[in-house]
Amino acid sequence: MTESLIREAAVYRNGAIIRRTGTIHLTQGKQSVQIVGLTRDADTNTVRLSLPEGLTGNNVQVEVLTAEAQQEVTRETWKKLNNVENRIGNLNRQMELWEINADFSAKESLSIKEMAEYIEAIPARKEKLQQQIDQLEEEKQQLNKQLKEKQQEAERYIVTADIEAPAEGDYPFELRYYAGRLSWQPVYEIHTDDDNERILIRLRGKIQQNTTEDWKKVKITLYTGNPSLSGTIPHLDPEYVSIYERPQRRNYAMGMMAAKAVAMEDYAVEEEICEAEAPMAMAMADVVNTSAQRVDNDVMMEYELPGTWDIAKGTQIFCDISDQYVDCRYHVVTVPKIDENAYLAAEVATSALEDLQQTEAAVYNKGTYMGNVYLDADMTEEKYDLSLGIDETVKVVRKQNRKHTSTVLLKGQKKTEYEYEIKITSRKNKPCQLTVIDQIPVSQDKTIVVDLKEKSGAVLKEETGEVKWDFQLEPQQAKSLNLAYDVAWPKDKNISL
């Protein structure tokens, strides 16, 4: 049988294409060959054998050893293991006998001297026996490891083929196949420094290698595709429309966002000032691995990792893929109706984020870990606010100053008047750009009238009811914003608001 070794792996989001190589000795003419190395992770339907020019091959099959042949592979190891277990059992019984024979109550013929000599010999004899047992236990451990490796070796697939060679010699060959239990996922880091109008988006890859084989010096390429997903073009069924009574809608969003805000608070990083003296520190810089080489591909993204990689079975590794600097506008965003926290954000062009996967990203502000955010840019918009975590130097308070319901007799209406005040205070030592977002209701019925009375210079998006303020706060400055609106509806009806 001829061995093959993994040389390259094209790892997808789920699964990988494996390339194995080896050298086979052939005689002149046609012969049957057997190549081993494929583990049970291989999809046998995808196995392909490649040979150099001048050789012809056919009848490529993937087989496994019979149960009898597998037992033959492990037979000698089983014998050694049983022998060691028997020796350990015999030594343990000797230990027990030395303990039992130390009871002299039924041995009146022994003298005091003989009993004393026996008792004195027990510790040394037991210590020697224990040393022998410990050595055998280590040997047993090694044999169990060998047995497991031989069992895995016996379970490997065997690739058989009929090959015809023009002359005797050593010839290279290549095996390619798809294997499961391999995957990678993108891991993003966002590095910010609000002294500069740009952010660094670092893409890393987390490779999970759950096969039964260790990888040694393997060339790795990462693909963003997923062969496990169906490649079938979807079928569009007819969409029917009918009239129905719209059910009353419950507002779950506020509770969910509030819970999210509490969770974000738990991750907020507090700065601590240490008064104690510390030794002078040298300037430090993060160690960054060599980035991957991006390759243009018609259907998916492709990244060639530099060098070769060792990945033990059942482990995961991280690799650096790319660094991307993106121009941005830093500002603080708050949506106090839902959450009175203020969030540092980087407004970026969505066109710069086209290649980003929808996933979480770790945020670092000047090297300090700020927590995780979820990347989910709406590519239909020109701009996207990339959240960089809670900004505790900006305090926001929203309070309701008025809510009054009255009946307008002449119009046959009920009307509720709402007034809110939003106060923003900056504790920063430099100017700060603020974006405050609130809303007014949007009527879906012509008999319900929403009248905006006061917006303190905000911009209203009528189709959604969004009210947005953009302004600059000076250091240590406070600013109040007012929002007031009326909602009127037929007095004989009820509304959900």
Image (spheres, rainbow, N blue to C red):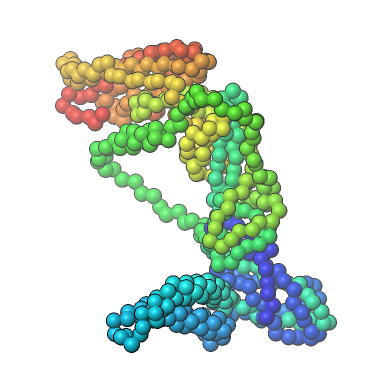
Rendered location of residue 86, percent (x, y): 47, 83
In the rendered image, the vertical position of residue 454 relative to residue 152, given as above or below: above
Residue located 68% across and 60% down the image: 217
Foreground pick, 121 / 99:
121
Displayed quadrant of residue 457? top left
Rendered location of residue 344, percent (x, y): 48, 27
Residue 478 falls left or right of residue 293: left
Rendered location of residue 176, percent (x, y): 65, 68
Rendered location of residue 325, percent (x, y): 63, 34
Residue located 46% across and 12% down the image: 476
Q: Is residue 423 visible?
A: yes
Residue 495 falls left or right of residue 202: left
Quadrant housing the N terminus: bottom right
Foreground pick, 316 / 112:
112
Q: Is residue 178 visible?
A: no
Residue located 17% across and 24% down the image: 491
Residue located 59% across and 43% down the image: 203
